[in-house]
Image (tube, rainbow, N blue to C red):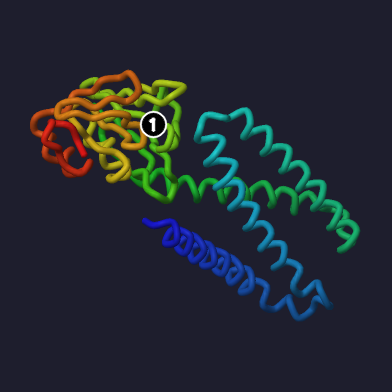
Amino acid sequence: MKPSQFLNHFVVRNLLGLTGLLLVHYLSDLYAIGERPGFAKLSPYLYLVLLYGWIVFHNRILFERQFLQGRKAVYFGWLFLLMTLGSFNLNFILLTQFNISRSLPYLVNFWVYTLTGLGVYVTYRFLGTHQKDGGRPVVLLPLASAETDYFSCMVGGDRQMIPHADIHYIESLENYLKVITKSKTYVTRLTMKEAEERLPKRQFVRISRSNIVNTMYVDRMEADTIWIGLKELSIGKVYKRYVADQFGGVRGDGSYS
């Protein structure tokens, strides 16, 4: 999916979600809206728009880019700080603008909507793919794409979202993979085929049964070998033509053009 296509999809999807939320509230508010004076007619809908924006921010920025990347302390710190500030702000507005002294039900709704929005997000975005592993159900994130630019995998029981740009190469250990980055090596239970499906095709090239390389970090190539830094990786015989096609062919001296 191209970035522009993803942006359009993201905007349309959230506009539909917000429209649905407002429509449901309007149907339940149809007979009461005419009895509210002035701005009070529209204030609940403004609140829903702001709440929806907060839920999108929480799910896409805080949860996805902090919690799912292993920065759980940062996530919970920001979450409780922003939720607390939002609760105080909501209480102040209800008291000063609407003369509502019993704000607890509204504050509870604020927290419940946030958790419900997270639950819907996790259910439909991250728990859609199920596989069997030794008779036990395993929950996998959806395949990585240009939408996220992350390689999703389980490491030590925690979900890791590794940026594609950080991955130098991937090495197979039978039913496990080593994902090598500049600063860290991750070991995850995946097959090479699953890894190929989760990675963008042009950026990552499989060069053998045991290795997938990120073309951004290829320093030197010969007919049978690729170097990433000081690491020498052999090109498998059955992959030579495929690798040659991906990197532009082989010159007369046996190296790639």
Furthest residue in direction bottom, as rendered? 34
Q: Give the residue number, with chain letter if any, for mark 1.
A: 167
Between 222 and 162, the one nearer to me in the picture: 222
| Horizontal arrangement in the rendering, residue 220 relative to residue 111 (left or right) | left
| Horizontal arrangement in the rendering, residue 131 relative to residue 58 (left or right) | left
Quarter of image, res 20: bottom right
| Horizontal arrangement in the rendering, residue 62 relative to residue 168 (left or right) | right
Residue 15 appearing in the image: yes
Looking at numbered disc 1 in the image, what kind of residue is underneath it? Ile
Quadrant in which the N terminus appears? bottom left
| Label 1 residue SS | strand
Between 97 and 213, the one nearer to me in the picture: 213
Quadrant in which the C terminus appears? top left
Residue 5: x, y in percent? Answer: 42, 62
Residue 244: x, y in percent? Answer: 16, 39
**Residue at (86% x, 59% y) in the render:** 100
Between 112 and 223, the one nearer to me in the picture: 223
The crowd level at tag 1 (other Cα within 10 Å; few <14, some 14-19, many 20+) is many
**Residue at (38% x, 41% y) in the render:** 141
Residue 135 appearing in the image: no
Between 199 and 55, the one nearer to me in the picture: 199
Residue 169: x, y in percent? Answer: 32, 28
